Amino acid sequence: MIDLWTSRRDTFIECEYWSQNEDEDIVNLNEIQYLKNPTGIFYAKESNAYLEDDSDINNTFLVQNNTVTLMTRDNISDLKRRDLVRYEGKMYMVTSISKVKNRNQMQYLRHNYSCTYYINLRG
């Protein structure tokens, strides 16, 4: 969701995200299922370098990991770990989300202050 109190001057990359379907009547508790339609969009920029490395699983499998960290000022408070994000045409899973509160707005606004989010993606 767009935060009207912040600027999008340097965040040009449009990202869509899909939330998990957590309805217990439809999905088993041991499965992860996502909604069919995107939950929302946000605009972001890369805050760290794009990392490609290999993971060794029990000395049996060698898997390539791609990791990227995005920074956004849009309100993505409904985004959670293990949700899916489409970034530059590829699908990534959210591994962690960090939130930095805007201290200048907290002085005047008690509840609706802006935040800067850092999203770690793995794909």
Image: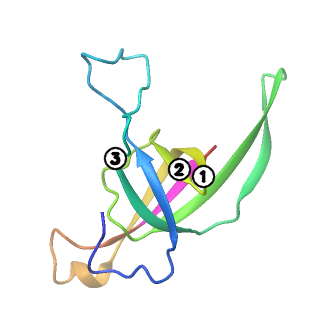
Secondary structure, mark 2, is strand
Mark 2 — residue?
A: 86
Secondary structure, mark 1, is loop
Disc 2 and disc 3 in contact, CB within 8 angstroms: no
- Amino acid type, callout 3: Thr
Instruction: Tell me the magenta residue range.
Output: 117-121
Mark 1 — residue?
A: 89
Q: Is residue 26 left or right of residue 99?
A: left
- Amino acid type, callout 1: Gly
If you read the primary sequence from the N terminus, does the residue marked by circle 3 or circle 1 appear first? Answer: 3
Q: Is residue 54 left or right of residue 71?
A: right
Q: Is residue 32 left or right of residue 55?
A: left
Question: Which numbered circle lies on residue 39?
Answer: 3
Binning the other alpha carbons within 10 Å of mark 2 as few (below 14), some (14 to 19) or many (20 upward) gives some
At x 41%, y 62%, the residue is 42
Q: From the image, give the main secondary structure of the stretch colored magenta.
A: strand
Binning the other alpha carbons within 10 Å of mark 1 as few (below 14), some (14 to 19) or many (20 upward) gives few
Quadrant housing the C terminus: top right
At x 30%, y 28%, the residue is 22
Question: Which numbered circle lies on residue 105?
Answer: none
What coloring was used for the rendering? rainbow
